[in-house]
Image (spheres, coloured by chain):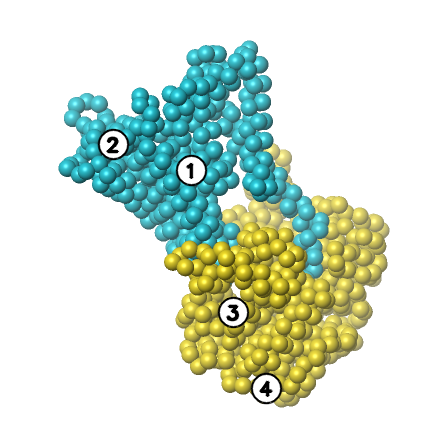
Chain colours: A cyan, B yellow
Amino acid sequence: MNKIMKELVTPFVAIIIAILIGACVMLLTGHNPLAAYGALFSGAFGSTVNLSNTMANAIPLILSGLGVAIAFKAGLFNIGAEGQYWIGSMAAVWIGYSVQGLPPILHISLAVLVSMLAAGLWAGIIPGLAKALVGAHEVITTMMMSYIAIFLSHYMLENGPMMQRGFVPQSPVILPSAMLGKIVDRTQLSWGLVIALVVCVIVYWLLYKTTLGYRLRAVGLNARAAKYAGINVSFNLVLALFISGMLAGLAGAVQMLGVQHRLYDSFSSGYGFTAIVVAILANNNPFGVILASIFFAALSTGGQSMQLVSGVPAHLTDVISGIIIFLIASKNVISIVQKRWRRRHTLAPVKEVQTGC
Amino acid sequence: MRTCLEVREITKSFPGVLANDHVNLTVREGEIHAILGENGAGKSTLVKIIYGLYKPDSGSIRLYDQELNFASPRQAIEAGIGMVHQHFMLIPALTVAENVVLGGEPGRIHYRRKENVEIVRQLAKQYHMELDPDAKVGDLTVGLQQRVEILKVFYRKAKLLILDEPTAMLTPQEVEELILVMERLRSQGVPIVFISHKLDEVQRISDHVTVMRAGKTVNTVETKSTTPQELANLMVGREVVLHVSKLPQKLGEPVLELVDIVVSSGRNEKVKKVSFEVHRGEIFGLAGIDGNGQFELVEAITGLLPCKTGRIRLLGKDITSSSVQHRTNAGIAYIPQDRQLDGLVMDFELTENFVLRDFSKAPFARLGQMQVKPIEEYATRLSEDFDVRPRRIHALAQNLSGGNQQKVILAREVSRNPELLIAAQPTRGLDVGAIQFIHNKLLELRSDGKAILLVSLELDEILALSDRIGVFYAGRLMGIFPSGQVTREQLGLLMTGVDLGSGGRL
């Protein structure tokens, strides 16, 4: 219990400070922060519909956030969750409209599996193998692969093979047998929520209760010790990126099958990037990912109603998330500096004495 | 000759260690002054104090007429102290000239490249160092990079040059060239302090030698009027050997057989055709000064580094190209030299660290799932058997003291009931109690008929525990001696590459 409280302190303080700074900005620009935040809160949680939409928004964040977190746990910074999300989306929609005559359970499962596999390979093959074999940094490779994925979707939809007949760059609608049902009617909240929660438990189990998770974490925390323990470091790096990509791909699939039902031409879903923020705020804890996802989803759904009611631009929520990231990052910087300082003044010299000369 | 640097009664302690204990050092103009000592004698601490990296607890330092009291290396540089670290601080992508002036570029906002190149060219000429100012540092050999470091020092108008283990990274030819450079500098009156633990070099280059042992300056002697024998005696000292009661040995069949092992790491061959055997019931001690290839040999045996040629056999079976995992299962246990870097995952709990080698095997894992109960029971048992404190199996490894961290590793490796235990520096940095504990455990294993390969930089440890002693120098075995048939002084000489001639070789 104590441990959980400790883990919650940093994100909680960061959120409070960010909200206070947001309030200062509102005061300076002549808005009433209490009214604005009230509107934001009721916009996010105030009614069944609002709450459902917030939760619906959280689903892809939870799934892709878990993906980013699992990569972090293995010491990898998968910055390309956005691209993996697109790959997953494309695969799910394609299976969704092109495969006919399957019962819903099979159709949905097939779409989900194919999209996870595609996105997993997207992350695992090029960035994963490049990292494992030649040491290419995954921040660069996953980012580049992300652009490739997004432009691939442009190609598919703008007079490409996945474009619906007509002039609008969008895919056909998926068949009803591939659609995920709604939990709450007339909202965006689908049974994808249950998938996200179950996957969260699975990821937790995988990371902390299996030998696979043990390997991934050992590689992430100390690759040298892992190698000494007989763990194949390269293979586990590839595997971590593969799983990470699978989860981002699953996020895309659930969003397509549950909410959008077709693929629209666009530059970014935003989920893949927010997922990084989610994982950081959650400190890569799978259950923390759920809370962080709901928080950011609430900011985005509540932000619109804040703008309508109190006239504060919805973009202020971006300011708030930016400040949160800044605070958490600076907290890490501070603790690194503290460690260095302590080391220089107490610990390291001892080691120097024994190793030096 | 004027006195250039005078260090008086410097004392510096770190928690638990008195690194420098009333150290004195006098360096005169135009001399090369060597500081000689074993690992951990306090040489590095001393030069770091002179260079302003550490603050001394007491004592004073004078450079010519100036009392020095540095808060940072920057002030040391301004006062005229130049230091070339063992590991160079150069930017490979920049040219020689750019590296030399870095941090003190000519011109203000506008960087004057031509002027810069000219300055460096002149400087190189002045000190007779052949260097192309326009060459990229990354393309240079280590020896030339070292010259760039030395030029850097003189560009900052150093009155005193400190070289920290300057020959450690060099090939023999490069060492010769460095010696030439040093002699030229001496003829120009530049005083040089150089730190080493290699007797032959000290003997060749220096005018005076200050020997350090256990944080104290033992003596300063004129190099000409001393012998390697005397220096080795001074360096190693004649303190009482750590007392361990050793039962007579029951030598058994060979467990580990090494045949003509060659190991490369980086650009150098670190181990050159080494062969020996370690038997059941034997502690084979591998003595040698750090950086002579003994740890590369250990990594080759454990499977972390590949063997270029040669064969490794464990209980008669060839394991030369087996994986780490396979060797572990075949019965090799390993206490790595750096417990925090290689031996433990510092952010893991003790439970997780205790099963680092066997986490995927029953009873710790079933069908890919970690089994909490057996792991916790195992961790509790090992903590008790090896007296790991605090007795909290869910504590993170990083929250334990060094001695207890080492006990965790020892417990894990020994409890696997190995055939061969390789212990690299098993007592490094530990207090006396922990050292005793670990020594006794090693002797217990020995009487259980295990084979133990002990690699240590501490001669005392080697002498106290080993049944046979192999001396490593420059990647080669200088000889193998039954303990008792070789003196500490002989070992000291062998470790620094002095061949004892015919005596003692088996």
Q: Position of residue A4 (x, y in %)?
A: 56, 40
Subunit of mark 1?
A
Pointer 1: residues within 10 angstroms few (<14), some, or many (20+)? many
Discs 2 and 1 lie in a common subunit: yes
**What residue is shown with label 2?**
A179
Identify whether A182 is placed above or below B200: above
Note whether residue B270 is visible: no
Subunit of mark 3?
B
Cβ–Cβ below 8 Å for labels 3 and 4? no
- At mark 3, the secondary structure is loop
Q: Position of residue B130 (x, y in %)?
A: 58, 58
Identify the mark nearer the N-term, 2 or 1: 1
**What residue is shown with label 3?**
B416
Q: Left or right: B353 with respect to B370?
A: right
Q: Left or right: A259 with respect to B497?
A: left
Q: Which mark is residue B250?
A: 4
Subunit of mark 2?
A
Pointer 2: residues within 10 angstroms few (<14), some, or many (20+)? many
Q: Which residue occupies 58% across, 35% down?
A: A10
| Quadrant location, the C terminus of chain B | bottom right
Q: Nearer the viewer, residue A182 or A98?
A: A182
Q: Find the distance from the CA under tag 1 to the CA under tag 4.
A: 60 Å
Q: Position of residue B146 (x, y in %)?
A: 60, 58
Discs 1 and 3 lie in a common subunit: no
Identify whether A151 is placed above or below A41: below
Q: Find the distance from the CA under tag 2 to the CA under tag 4.
A: 75 Å
